[in-house]
Image: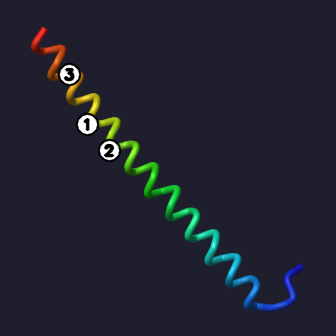
């Protein structure tokens, strides 16, 4: 168990930061994927 509240808060903060980073990366990949799919659709229409 954690002895000090400070330790707990530090751990919580680290977890939130890593979660935030993960979500940001996921959002970025999703938007890139959507843009790529739109470009593919445009190319298919041209063919």
Residue at which label 3 appears:
41
Q: Which mark is residue 4?
A: none
Query: Which secondary structure lies at badge 1?
Result: helix
Residue at which label 2 appears:
31
Query: Which secondary structure lies at badge 2?
Result: helix
Residue at 32 percent across and 40 percent down: it is: 32
Apparent side of residue 7 relative to residue 47 in the rendered image (left or right): right
Earlier-in-chain disc, 1 versus 3: 1
Residue 19 in the image: state x and y as whole percent: 56, 62
Q: Tell which residue pokes out farthest to the left in this image.
A: 46
Residue at 85 percent across and 82 percent down: it is: 2
Residue at 18 percent across and 14 percent down: it is: 44
Q: Tell which residue pokes out farthest to the top in this image.
A: 47
Residue at which label 1 appears:
35
Quadrant showing the N terminus: bottom right
18 lies above or below 34? below
8 lies above or below 37? below
Residue 9 in the image: state x and y as whole percent: 68, 84
Apparent side of residue 39 relative to residue 25 in the rendered image (left or right): left
Residue at 40 percent across and 51 percent down: it is: 27
Asked if the residue at tag 2 contacts the one at tag 1, i.e. Cβ–Cβ closer than 8 Å, the answer is yes
Asked if the residue at tag 2 contacts the one at tag 3, i.e. Cβ–Cβ closer than 8 Å, the answer is no
């Amino acid at each position: 168990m954690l002895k000090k509240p400070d330790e707990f808060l530090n751990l919580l903060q680290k977890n939130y930061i890593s979660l935030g980073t993960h979500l940001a990366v996921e959002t970025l990949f999703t938007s890139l994927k959507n843009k790529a799919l739109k470009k593919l659709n445009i190319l298919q229409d041209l063919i």
